Amino acid sequence: MSSLHADERAKRIAQEPLLPVGQSTGFVTGTWSSIKETLEHRELLGLLVRREIKARYKDSSLGLVWSLVKPLAQLLVYYFAIGQILGIARSIPSFAIFVFVGLTVWGLFTEIVSSGTMSIVNNAGLVKKVYLPREIFPLAAVGGGLFNFCLQLIILIAATIVAGQVPLTRDLALAPLALANIVVFASAIGMVLAAVTVYLRDLQHLIEVVLTVLFWGSPVVYSFSFVNSAIGGTWLEQLYLANPVTLSVLGMQKALWLAGSTESTQINFPPELALRLWVSVGVSIVLLWVAQRIFSRLQGNFAQEL
């Protein structure tokens, strides 16, 4: 291209009007257009989910087997360290199934939040080169987390069959409700953190610390009966139960941990657990909407910040 043509091209580009990137509507409006745009790119979302799963075990000899080995190793550590050595297993029937249910739910939550937090930064090349609905990056993290969750759920169901603790009761209906609650809540957290981390990179390290603290704020490796005996009937107990992660863990335990309802005489579950879960799902949906609106307002400067 000659210098004359280059100059003419530069002049034509300079005369082109500037187009805004990101949400140009108000904070409340624009939700439907964002959903529609994301749905139009659903094939790309599927490709990103598959890429995330493949990239996680790239150059690995065992591949997806690591998705099973990691939670099983975690289960053994908690089973012997906390269950047998500290003696918690003596007061919790079928402790292995109990702790695996909690670890499975907690693993899903942490994977969606951790992967979602770094999803925009890790895809900086794509974000800077082409325009896409950026929401698909944290949503791809949700897809990857659900894939691993399904693998672990298969192991959990097999364990209940082997142990003769098949949970074929009405409480099994709580499982999809608890799963929906944890996925929607984690998606909301992951989406807003994905946007904020572009501007504040230190946030990724703070999230790891916060997740470590939150782990002990949910009945993953200890029963709700311990909490009830310590702070039962107080506002602290209600505050503890206001955590969507806590409610999802309790919901999955009620659905899949049969011994907690049939063998234990302790209060392993709070009253009106189903109602609490429904309320939590509603609140989580509102949080997801707010998170998407914040994400939409912040995404305009992603390319410059990255």
Image: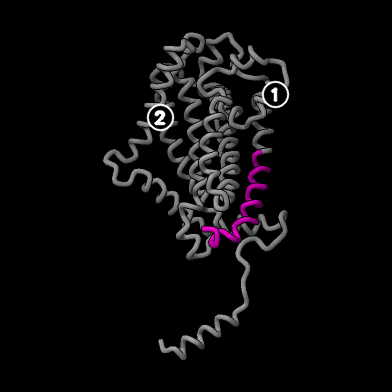
Whether residue 270 is visible: yes
Check contact, mark 1 vs mark 2: CB within 8 A.
no
Quadrant of the frame with the N terminus: bottom left
Q: Is residue 215 above or below residue 142?
A: above
Instruction: Give the magenta-colored segment's residue range.
Output: 284-306
Location of mark 1 (residue) = 238
Of residue 170 and residue 163, the one placed in the foreground of this image is 163
Of residue 234 and residue 48, the one placed in the foreground of this image is 234
Amino acid tagged 1: Gln
Of residue 40 and residue 292, the one placed in the foreground of this image is 292
- Identify the mark nearer the N-term, 1 or 2: 2
Distance between the Cα atoms at labels 1 and 2?
30 Å
Horizontally, residue 254 falls left or right of residue 47, namely right
The label on residue 71 is 2
Magenta region includes residue 46: no
Amino acid tagged 2: Pro
